[in-house]
Image (spheres, rainbow, N blue to C red):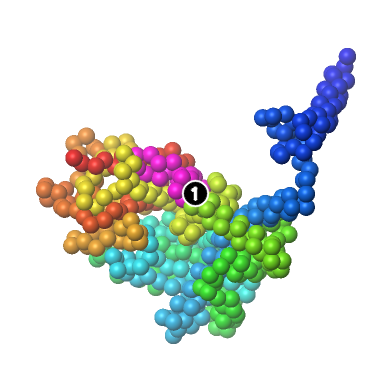
């Protein structure tokens, strides 16, 4: 018998097997089976259960709609948060820097490091920040970066779904600076004279996070000078300084108030509008079509049926539960540290839309792992909550000190926050972190021990290695590794254990 004939008979036999399995599933057991089974304890993927009543049909429909709504809500959370952050940026810029002109062409800058009085959770005390939003449907923009020869810096470019789509900075473009033309998805044209690189955004609405490393308190003025030298120019203004550039009017982009969104339906409708202005990638079309019948998706209006709206509410609640589950159990904990998967914050990253939604709720605007990885600890290595009344030691062996790319000014830091609000902890030393650039004291074998405790070490020489805690409450530790080595970016690096001292 020829090989082709054998193959045909094999396929025919499989088809017959599937057919008779389906028939057998429908005839086996009672006439009103309660679940999708061919025989007790077995699942039959070729058999669709036939509902026995209109009530059961409605129950199936409800389950289906709740499942669709769960997926739709998870997908909608990042664009809603992006719209909300843009709204807050435009509002705050006009409130506090109204005399500076149109916010769409400028960075809102933090010119001093965070302190215990900073209200933001998990505040970074390694870099000074800047943030801006661009509306590229109006005009392409040119980012002018001066030479920054002596420190880490980065500009993270983030699309309307809170995915990092490109970076400008130490790792990607070097310390020499440059002129970067940022264009929308539909822009066409040649690279203009004087532009070093064209960066194409996947959506017209984007934001940019600016991060510049400061060495110590005496270095802040130097960083402020760098901030002042950075420019954002409409393309026509870049090409002709005498030109009058037209930037979008902020009020045109603030018609919906996300701060007033107190229910899932309002969140979804705002997200629908924003996604309509910023269509998702074509690769997501199959997924967005799944929940589109509910009126969730780019430019859609929510279904008007009361029962469907109720199911959307139930789906949103399940989405919230899913995000909580991922936040609490989605990362393996080793030595007390949560180990994040690689490529978090990038489209197509691990965990899909559920992980992306949770990450943006918990750590909005998080860096891609190639740029920085964050290890958070809520417990010690024995999985006991970190207590400010206790003393802890973290000893990195010589070969396990967080690896960084020093050629691009990579660094690491350990920062402490209170457990309740995730804010920096007030202390008499005004010290909130230990940084790799500090004058740390290494052990004779090249290992490094860091001390987290409420009182200073008895040996004053170890003060650089001390991170003060608050004896009155529990705390969180955050180990940030910027421009980590391959072990870090691949997800295999595990920080040293957090050990409670007797």
In what quadrant of the picture does the N terminus appear? top right
Alpha-carbon neighbours of circle 1 within 10 Å: few (<14), some, or many (≥20)? few
Would residue 330 be counted in the magenta stretch? yes
Would residue 227 be counted in the magenta stretch? no
**Badge 1 element:** helix
Q: Nearer the viewer, residue 501 or 4?
A: 501
Residue 178 in the image, given as x and y percentages of width and height:
48, 63
Which residue occupies 20% across, 41% down? 501
The part of the image, by quadrant, that contains residue 488 is top left
Magenta span: 325-343
Determine if residue 183 is in view: no
Which residue occupies 18% across, 36% down? 444
Residue extending furthest bottom? 99
On the picture, is 478 further left or further right than 321? left
Which residue occupies 79% across, 43% down? 50
Determine if residue 472 is in view: yes
Q: Is residue 485 above or below residue 389?
A: above
Residue 197 in the image, given as x and y percentages of width and height:
56, 61
On the picture, is 439 further left or further right than 18? left
């Amino acid at each position: 018998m020829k090989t082709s004939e054998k193959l045909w008979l094999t396929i025919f036999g499989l088809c017959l097997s599937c057919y008779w399995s389906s028939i057998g599933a429908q005839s086996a057991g009672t006439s009103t089976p309660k679940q999708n089974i061919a025989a007790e304890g077995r699942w039959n993927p070729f058999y669709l259960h036939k509902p026995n009543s209109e009530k059961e049909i409605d129950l199936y429909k409800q389950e289906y709609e709740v499942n669709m709504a769960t997926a739709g809500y998870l997908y909608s959370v990042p664009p809603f948060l992006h719209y909300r952050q843009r709204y807050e940026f435009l509002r705050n810029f006009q409130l506090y820097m109204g005399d500076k002109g149109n916010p769409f062409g400028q960075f809102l800058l933090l010119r001093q490091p965070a302190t215990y009085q900073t209200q933001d959770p998990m505040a970074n005390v390694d870099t000074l920040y800047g943030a801006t939003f661009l509306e590229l449907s109006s005009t392409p923009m040119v980012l002018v970066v001066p030479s920054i020869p002596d420190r880490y810096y980065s500009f993270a470019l983030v699309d309307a779904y809170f995915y990092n789509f490109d970076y400008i900075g130490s790792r990607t473009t070097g310390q020499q600076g440059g002129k970067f033309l940022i264009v929308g998805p539909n822009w066409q044209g040649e690279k203009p004279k004087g532009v070093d690189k064209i960066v194409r955004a996947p959506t017209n609405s984007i934001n940019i996070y600016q991060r510049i490393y400061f060495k110590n308190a005496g270095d802040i003025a130097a960083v402020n000078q760098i901030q002042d030298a950075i420019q954002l120019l409409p393309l026509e203004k870049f090409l002709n300084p005498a030109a009058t550039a037209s930037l979008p009017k902020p009020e045109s982009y603030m018609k919906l108030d996300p701060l007033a969104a107190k229910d899932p339906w309002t969140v979804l409708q705002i997200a629908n509008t924003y996604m309509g202005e910023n269509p998702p990638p074509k690769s997501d079309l199959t997924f967005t079509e799944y929940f589109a019948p509910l009126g969730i998706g780019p430019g859609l209006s929510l279904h008007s049926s009361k029962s469907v709206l109720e199911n959307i509410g139930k789906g949103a609640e399940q989405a919230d539960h899913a995000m909580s589950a991922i936040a609490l159990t989605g990362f393996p904990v080793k030595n007390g540290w949560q180990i994040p998967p690689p490529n978090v914050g990038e489209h197509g990253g691990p965990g899909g839309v559920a992980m992306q939604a949770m990450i943006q709720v918990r750590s909005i605007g998080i860096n891609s792992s190639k740029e920085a990885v964050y290890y958070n600890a809520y417990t010690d290595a024995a999985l006991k909550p970190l207590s400010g009344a206790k003393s802890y030691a973290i000893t990195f062996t010589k070969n396990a000190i967080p690896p960084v790319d020093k050629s691009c000014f990579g660094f690491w830091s350990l920062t402490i926050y209170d457990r309740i609000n995730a804010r920096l902890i007030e202390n008499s030393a005004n010290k909130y972190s230990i940084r790799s650039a500090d004058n740390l004291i290494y052990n004779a074998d090249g290992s490094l021990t860091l001390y987290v405790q409420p009182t200073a070490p008895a040996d004053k020489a170890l003060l650089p290695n001390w991170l003060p805690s608050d004896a009155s409450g529990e705390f969180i530790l955050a180990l940030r590794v910027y421009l980590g080595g391959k072990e870090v970016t691949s997800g295999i690096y595990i920080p040293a254990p957090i050990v409670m001292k007797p």
